[in-house]
Amino acid sequence: METTVNTTLGEEGMAERRCWLMKSEEDEYSIDDLERDRSAAWTRVRNYEARNLMRDEMSPGDLVLYYHSNAKPSGVVGLARVASEPYPDPTQFDEDDPYYDEKASREDPRWWLVDVAFVERFPRKVPLKEIKKHPELSDMVLVKRMRLSVQPVAAAELELIRKLAAGPD
């Protein structure tokens, strides 16, 4: 799976960037919230595979498909970019936070995150049901392992979803 894409998106010159999909419930933190805030720390991820992707593989400038989960319908609603190097998720240390982790320490953090910055809102949502209808997208992690909240995306998959979001030619 080719997961890099050439893009400028605010960068000088062309650079190879990896592609991702990150899920957020619309009523928790929507694309509207990200657009308003311009960037946000992607806190409270408590899945080791998703954590490892953020900690070990994401880099500033990588592109992110922004996905509203548990929506009616769920789907891709916009584009963001990774805006920071990975760093420890502060919610793991906050005893008042529901995502507090008593096994984590500042010397040995268990949970990591990246900041994500708004790039664009798509003209239309690309629902999961529509994504599943495209044979070119049948190998997407989103289709095969829907529950993973942070997942790699092939560059061709990202480009096709952007095209679908633009609507009919």
Image (tube, rainbow, N blue to C red):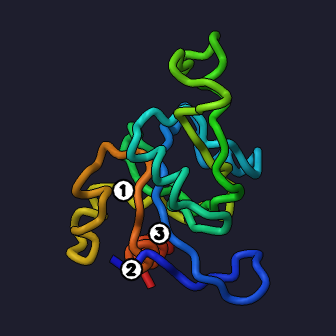
Residue type of the residue flagged with mark 1: Pro
Q: Are marks 1 and 3 in contact (CB under 8 Å)?
A: no
Which residue is at the front of the view, 50 or 121?
Answer: 50
Residue type of the residue flagged with mark 3: Ala
- In this view, which residue lies farthest toward the front? 107
* First-in-chain label (1 vs 2): 2
- Residue beneath disc 1: 127
- Residue beneath disc 2: 2
Q: Are marks 1 and 2 in contact (CB under 8 Å)?
A: no
Quarter assignment of residue 90: top right
Could you tell me which secondary element the residue under label 3 belongs to? helix
* Residue drawn at x 75%, y 46% as measured from the top left: 36
Residue 165's tag is 3
Could you tell me which secondary element the residue under label 1 belongs to? strand
The nearer-to-camera label among 1 and 2 is: 2
Residue 17's tag is none
On screen, residue 150 versus residue 122, left or right, reads: left
